[in-house]
Amino acid sequence: MIAVTIALVPVIVFLLYIYFRDKYEKEPVGLLLRGLLAGALATIPIVFVEYGLTAMGSGLTGYFSSAYISFIVAGFTEELFKFLAVMLIFWRRREFNERFDGIVYAVFVSLGFAGVENILYVFSEGGTVGVIRAVTAVPAHLLFGVTMGYYLGLSRFMPESRNYLLFLALGIPILLHGVYDFMILSQHWAGLLLFVPFVVYLWKSGLNKMKMLSARGAGPADEPEGPGPTAGPDPLP
């Protein structure tokens, strides 16, 4: 029980951090809890899909196996289901009236998944693994969620670039997730050597994305509400 609690503490801390970073208009708690629950429940189909994909790639060996598991089994599957959860629950909500809301929604879904995933690791591999993942994998899912939400927030208010930005909202988290996992699974010295700099990059990039959308965010009085907003700045790099 103690290991489970420790494994979930970072999830709670990061949820509160993102919630209070939303400085213009806080999202309804009930709506955010729906996103958190959706991320948690997404573990069910993800487990089955990953099991099937793993079986399909059972003939691969070495770095090919590591890449397949990292980018396809884990990265593609997990980020796809998170993306679908965010789109289904939040995309057409009137509450989605600020760019920073995209980050809030995506992070809540991502951390809902990360929390349940970490608990499963506690029960299957022991408390030590769960605690280690609490300070490695959970922050990684946070940062993947920030990246997804950043592009979702931009796409919501930029219909002229919406399809491209939605593609980035899914594609870049898959890429980052895959690289993160591959560096660990491949056990290649170069990947292990670059792992810490890569994590530092994830943090710097994620914090910068939050800062940019928070600075350029606007309250509902300044942005049109509803599913088809049309105002917004040019995409940020």
Image (cartoon, grey):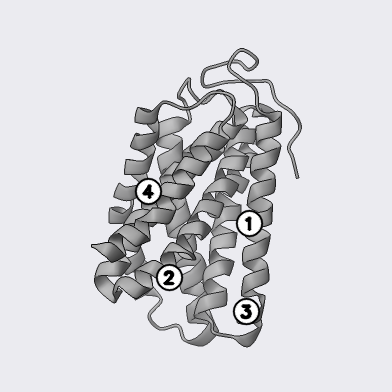
CA gap between label 1 and label 4 equals: 20 Å
Label 3 sits on what residue type? Gly
Query: Mark 3 against mark 1, which lies toward the viewer?
Result: 1
List the residue tagged with mark 4.
112
* Pick the front one: 75 or 30: 30
CB under 8 Å between callouts 2 and 3?
no
Indicate the amino acid at tag 1.
Trp
Asked where in the image residue 58 lies, by quadrant, the reply is bottom left
Left-right relation of 204 to 66:
right
Percent x, y of residue 66: 50, 78
Estimate how packed mark 3 is, as few (under 14), some (14 to 19) or many (20 or more) residues with alpha carbons within 10 Å: some
Identify which amino acid the numbered label 2 is placed on. Ile
Q: Quadrant of residue 50?
A: bottom left
Left or right: residue 94 versus residue 159 is left
Specify the amino acid type for callout 4: Gly
Write the residue at 35% across / 61% down. Answer: 6
Residue with the mark numbered 3 = 191
Q: Are marks 4 and 3 in contact (CB under 8 Å)?
A: no
Q: CA distance from mark 3 to mark 1?
A: 18 Å
Q: Secondary structure at mark 3?
A: helix
Q: Secondary structure at mark 1?
A: helix
Q: Nearer the viewer, mark 2 or mark 3?
A: 2
Mark earlier in primary sequence (3, 1): 3
Residue denoted by label 1:
203
The label on residue 132 is 2
Examine the rendered structure and indicate whether residue 140 appears above or below residue 170.
below
Q: Could you tell me which residue is drawn at 74 percent across and 40 percent down?
A: 236
